[in-house]
Amino acid sequence: MGNGDAFGERALITGELRVANVTAVSNVTTLVMDRATFNESIGELRDLMDFNDRLHTIKGLSIFAESDLTQIEFERLAEKICEVCYKKGTKLVQIGSPYPQNIWMFRKGELIVYGTKSDTIHKMQGGDYFGDKSILNSLEHISSHDATCETVSLSIYIIILLVGQL
C-alpha cells in the first residue's frame, strides 16, 4: 500500500471482523476514522461499492465479457440490476409460459432447471446465470423448461432488459 491507499472500510460498512493484518514496513502517518464519523462522512460509499460489485459481475459473464460494449453501456447495465431473494419452490420460468427477458445471475442458493427435450436436470448455483438466450429472442418467446428455486433462500441479481434499451 502507498500514499492515499485505505483499508478497513469493508469492516466499517458490514460490521464483519477484519480478515487481514496491516503492518508498517517504514515510518507511516495514518488518518483514522471511527464508524460513526465514517457513516456520517462517507455513507454513500456502500452504494458505490454495491454498484462496482454489480459492474464487476456483469463484466465477468462470458456473454458480456466477449462483447464490444463500451464502459458507459456496462454502467447502464449495472444500473438495471436489482438483487432479489426467492423462497424455496418459487418458479422463475415455467414450461409453456412467456419467458421474461431477464438475465438471472446467481449469488447464493440453488436453482434447478428441468427441460422438456431431455431428462437432464441442470443445477445452477453462485456464479451461474441463465436467461441470456431470452434477450436474443422475440418478446413472444415461450419457455421450454421450468426453473425452480431449490434452497430456502436464493439470492440473485436480475438484469431486467428490453431489447435495445441500453
Image: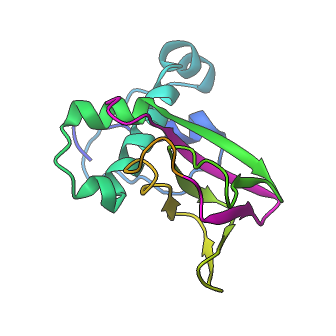
Taking depth in this image into account, of 83 and 63 the one nearest to the observer is 63
Q: Residue at x 68, y 61 (%)?
A: 95
Residue 150's quadrant in the figure? Answer: bottom right
Residue 69's quadrant in the figure? Answer: top left
State which quarter of the image contains the C terminus: top left
Q: Is residue 148 above or below residue 86?
A: below
113 sits left or right of 158 in the view: right
Say if the magenta span includes residue 52. Answer: no
Give coordinates of residue 146: x percent, y percent: 68, 64
Residue 112's quadrant in the figure? Answer: bottom right
Q: Is residue 131 visible?
A: yes
Magenta stretch in the rendered image: 142-166
Q: Is residue 4 visible?
A: no
> How many numbered marks appear?
0
Q: Is residue 29 above or below residue 68?
A: above
Taking depth in this image into account, of 39 and 92 the one nearest to the observer is 92
Q: Residue at x 32, y 62 (%)?
A: 62
Give coordinates of residue 134: x percent, y percent: 46, 52
75 sits left or right of 159 in the view: left
Q: How is the image coloured?
A: rainbow
Say if the magenta span includes residue 164. Answer: yes
Q: Residue at x 32, y 32 (%)?
A: 164
Taking depth in this image into account, of 42 and 153 the one nearest to the observer is 153
